[in-house]
Image (cartoon, helix red, strand yellow):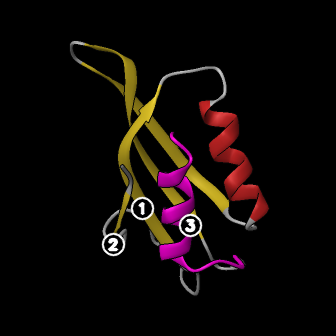
Amino acid sequence: MYYSFDVGRFLVQPCRTLIGFFGSMKLGVAALPTLASFLRDHNITVCQIISSSIEGCQDELMVLAFLDLTHSDVQLERLLEEINGSGL
């Protein structure tokens, strides 16, 4: 499950709508392309994505993503619903 948080202490880009996502993602060939497709479809720019393995879990990653929603056509809540509903 993904959720957002305030990125004000991590990124400084005046006049931009920046958000952070943190959650786990299934490890698979289609996972990142699927996530990228959601973001592209809503005109969201990826500032940074960091992932790391979860000890003792071979099929999931922890993901931290910083995104720019300045020109996005979707509300944050709707984007979270789409991503969480996708099975990522």
Q: Which residue is mark 2?
A: 6
Neighbourhood count class around disc 3 (C-alpha, 10 Å): few under 14, some 14–19, many 20 upward: some
SS type, badge 2: loop
Q: Amino acid at mark 3?
A: Leu
Which residues are the magenta region? 72-88
Depth check: give the residue in front, 49 or 74: 74
Q: Are marks 3 and 1 in contact (CB under 8 Å)?
A: no
User: In this rendering, which labeled residue sits more in front, label 3 or label 1?
Assistant: 3
- Seen at 46% across and 29% down, the residue is 26
- Residue 24 location (% of width, % of height): 36, 38
Q: Are marks 2 and 1 in contact (CB under 8 Å)?
A: yes
- Residue 84 location (% of width, % of height): 47, 53
Label 2 or label 1, whichever comes before in sequence order: 2
Label 3 or label 1, whichever comes before in sequence order: 1
Tell me the CA gap for discs 2 and 1.
7 Å
In this rendering, position of residue 27 left or right of residue 35: left
User: In this rendering, which labeled residue sits more in front, label 2 or label 3?
Assistant: 3
| Residue 79 disc label | 3
SS type, badge 1: strand
- Residue 5 location (% of width, % of height): 32, 68
Q: Are marks 2 and 3 in contact (CB under 8 Å)?
A: no
Tell me the CA gap for discs 2 and 3.
16 Å
Magenta highlight on residue 14: no
Residue 12 lies, with reference to residue 88, above or below; the image says below
In this rendering, position of residue 51 left or right of residue 70: left
Label 2 or label 3, whichever comes before in sequence order: 2
Q: Residue furthest left?
A: 56
Q: Which residue is mark 1?
A: 20
Q: Amino acid at mark 1?
A: Gly
Task: Count the numbered circles shown.
Answer: 3
Residue 33 lies, with reference to residue 7, above or below; the image says above
